[in-house]
Image: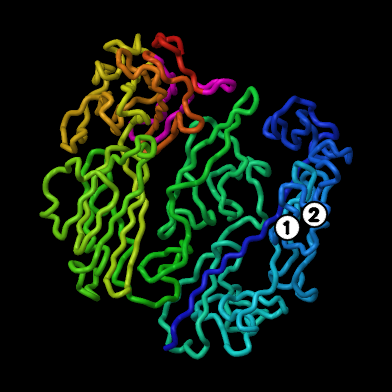
Amino acid sequence: MKKLFFILICFAAAFIMSCGGSEGGSGKACESSLDCNPGEVCSNGTCRSKNSANDGSGEDGELPDGGNGHGSGGNDGETTDDGDDQTGNNDELAGNCKPGETKECAYQGPEETKDVGPCKAGVSTCKDDGNWGRCEGAVEPVLENNEELCTNGIDDDCDGTVDNGINNACSYWHDDEVSDADADTTSDPGIIDVGYTGDYSDAYQIPSDALETVCTDTCIPEKAECLSNNIVEGEVDSALCNGLDDDCDGEVDEGCSCSPGQTQACFLGPKNYRNKGTCHDGTQTCKVTMRGTRSVGRWGECVGGISPTQDVCDNADNNCNGCDDDKLCCAPPIDCAYDLTEDGDFLPFTPKIINGKKIYDTGHKFNDADTVTWTWTLTKGPCDEVLGNVNSFVKGAKTQEELSGDFTDSDKGIVVNGVGLSQFKVKFRLSGNYKIHLKVDRGNGEIYECEWVIKVVSAGLRIELCWDTNTKVDADLHMGKNGKTTDWASSSACYFSTKNPDWGYPTTPNYDKDGNWKESMNNPRLDIDNVARGPIPENINIDNPNPDDVFRVGVRYYPGTSTNNTVTRPVINVYCGGTLKATYGVDPQVNNFSTNNDFWKVVEVKWVGDSSSDACELTPKWNDSTGYVVNQDAVPGYSSW
């Protein structure tokens, strides 16, 4: 039987949407367009409507001596002949134009192929400075060996016929259960359209003479659901601010507003592929920038998740379209769909062993699990970049018996590598989402790899503190409960002096900071007090908060040390029911936290639901003009929030 062909084709189409405002605009003072109302741009320090911001006077974005791209190369490089604009005529992109206006660029392919199949001209959009931007979205005929690609169900050469290769007879394989509605009636009746809709979509083909001997994989891939236009979600519809890449352009919730430090789950891929196969959510954090006298929050990158990739032979659905090992018809020695929580969840301070022999060589195809090289790799945790170190512990061995005993400081790290290390032991100090990557190298050129996202969870409310100058400065985490706490540094507050104040909560069974199971753990409790001892986090836990309980969180620059006036950048992570709800202090950094007794008022947390909930309402202590609120040289009263 001939080798089965599999190709994943991604095609991106960019369309630019513009919005208008009033004829003259609001006239507000501005430093950038972010300071203006929707539909306006910042022109010479004043908010004006996009339609009137450039009236031909040359005041907005015009270059001296006529240098607006008319062959002079005098602008920012967007219109010079560097190949980026793909128009063949740079004068087309010379200003002036109205910001947001779009126009079609000159088509560079053969004239008869324009608007046939996927072929089309690009589109240029007028920039805020009144000059045309680069052409985007152009698609021209694609040939291989002077004929059309005979592998993907697309009219690549734009001649009006799909997959009309000269030397190869191609057809899709499908079984008799495929409905007539799925058939592509515009070409060979043996072709099934499995859904080319843009990025992430799939097409599967095999040589026609192999149809009778191919394996009986009858799974029909699910079509990708993507909006047809490349849009800015926040400028189109607030309902699209949903943590999804609705238009499949590789960005999530662009243009959507958010509050300082807020986080959300996000997914880079078609929305109907979310949490299918190997795909897993990542996390976005709200990035805040001061614009004049106010702050503007916009979502940052979606990081830490797993997006659709090309399917490979590993017993898993890598492209997340509902089919494992699409039409590859193979029997791999590795199972990347294995559930790492089969033997229990991942918990803070809790050692966990992963048995790699349940993942690789499960059917003993090679029977060499003890002789191949295993590489286990973790991503860093939420505080690790700030601390300059890692707070996870890892070991590897050939047997579980060899992993007995607790971790030592020498086990701190994120990578284990060696021959036969099929058993992997890990312990986390911090909550959060982590990636675990496994690579199995047989030494003969055959390599098998898997990747998972695992969630290190802790019930109830968990507050974690880390700071960059942790070897010099003693920063302290404080938490109070409204109605109970009278002062930040009293026996009614939870901090280094009173690690277990009496707030009326019963004890709960849980693991302590050394990974030992305890039947009775206090609530609340400060697990770790870092007294300038290096990259160690501080954290406070309440396993069983009640509905409507309200807590306040603060950080103190501990007085009486020789490190006074050392600038420190603390970060607070808030977890509710094991889900990261906010990261405060990362962007922008906390300012003016450098003097003994400085006190950063961070956030007020209201618990929602019972103790098993992951819902909480967060109100950060934030000033739109100055950023985070830091009391200088004095600890404020608890009630002066």
Amino acid found under the numbered disc labelled 2: Leu
Q: Would you say residue 476 sits in the magenta stretch?
A: no
Q: Residue at x 77, y 48 (%)?
A: 74
The quadrant of the rendering that contains the N terminus is bottom left
Q: Which residue is mark 2?
A: 93
Q: Quadrant of residue 574?
A: top left
Q: Main secondary structure of the magenta part?
A: strand
Q: Quadrant of residue 140?
A: bottom right
Q: Nearer the viewer, residue 243 or 123?
A: 123
In this orientation, does residue 259 appear? yes
**Above/below status of 453 relative to 503:** below
Q: Residue at x 68, y 44 (%)?
A: 236
Say if mark 2 contacts mark 1, CB within 8 Å.
Answer: yes
In this orientation, does residue 481 appear? no
Q: Residue at x 53, y 76 (%)?
A: 178
- Which residues lie in the magenta part? 598-627
Q: Quadrant of residue 446?
A: bottom left
Residue 187: give x, y in percent of width and height.
Answer: 65, 82
Amino acid found under the numbered disc labelled 1: Cys
Residue 21: give x, y in percent of width and height.
Answer: 79, 36
Left or right: 141, with 446 as reference point: right
Q: Which residue is mark 1?
A: 135
Residue 157: give x, y in percent of width and height.
Answer: 68, 77
Q: Would you say residue 617 sits in the magenta stretch?
A: yes
For label 2, the SS is: helix
